[in-house]
Image (spheres, rainbow, N blue to C red):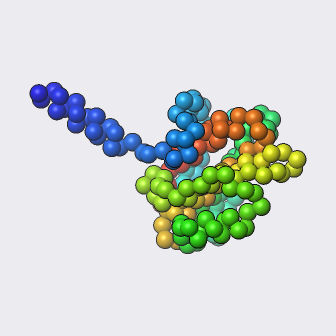
Amino acid sequence: MKINFTLFLILMISFSSCTKKLSLQEELNCSTLSLFSNTFERKDIHKNFKIDIPKTWKYQLYYDDYQSSIFMADTIKELTASFILDVAWKNGGLELNDSFEKSLLDTSSYSIVKSNLEQFKDLPCYWNVSKGIKENFTYHIFNLFIKTSEGDYLEFKTEIYGDDLVDERLCEALKIINSVEIIK
């Protein structure tokens, strides 16, 4: 009986410490894809967050008084076989609600295919996937906004060109996004 209780306790701790996946990640069944290996950790210039980047990828840092970002891409692959990811820490208030989503819908030149308000690593977030045409390619964008405090938020933008393996590339982007760690 004591062994069963100990096993039960270990299982409960294990399950409660797991971070819930975004509903999009669940929908795409992203857990079936392999994780990136051979990565390195990179911090933004203002030291607000860190993220794991595959070592073969190119990246650029940007900052000003109101934001700092890491822009990255796999430049070894063709544009229609990879994706571009921009992660930015931004200063400013962000209210994640229906009016926020409506303002994005009103200003976007692409049609939003999927969206949701939910939690990411116990923080409120909003994400959407939109689709359109850019530079004669079918173009998919995944945007993720995470409110980190009253005056700051993280914004992720993933750009996917072409129609081949869109879900798989989106899952790869989500795996990199999941590696983000807030430092502040």
Q: Is residue 136 left or right of residue 74?
A: right
Q: Residue furthest left?
A: 1
Q: Residue furthest right?
A: 136
Could you tell me if residue 134 is visible in this image? yes
Q: Is residue 171 left or right of residue 135?
A: left
Q: Nearer the viewer, residue 144 or 129?
A: 129
Who's the residue at 17% across and 28% down the image?
A: 4
Q: Quadrant of residue 34?
A: top right
Q: Is residue 181 above or below residue 100?
A: above
> Residue 169, position in %: x, y?
67, 38
> Residue 11, position in %: x, y?
28, 34
Who's the residue at 16% across and 33% down the image?
A: 5
Q: Quadrant of the N terminus?
A: top left
Q: Is residue 66 above or below residue 144?
A: below
Counting labels gives: 0
Q: Quadrant of residue 14?
A: top left
Q: Is residue 4 left or right of residue 96?
A: left
Could you tell me if residue 183 is visible in this image? no
Q: Is residue 101 left or right of residue 78?
A: left
> Residue 2, position in %: x, y?
12, 29
Who's the residue at 58% across and 39% down the image?
A: 28
Q: Quadrant of residue 146?
A: bottom right
> Residue 71, position in %: x, y?
70, 51
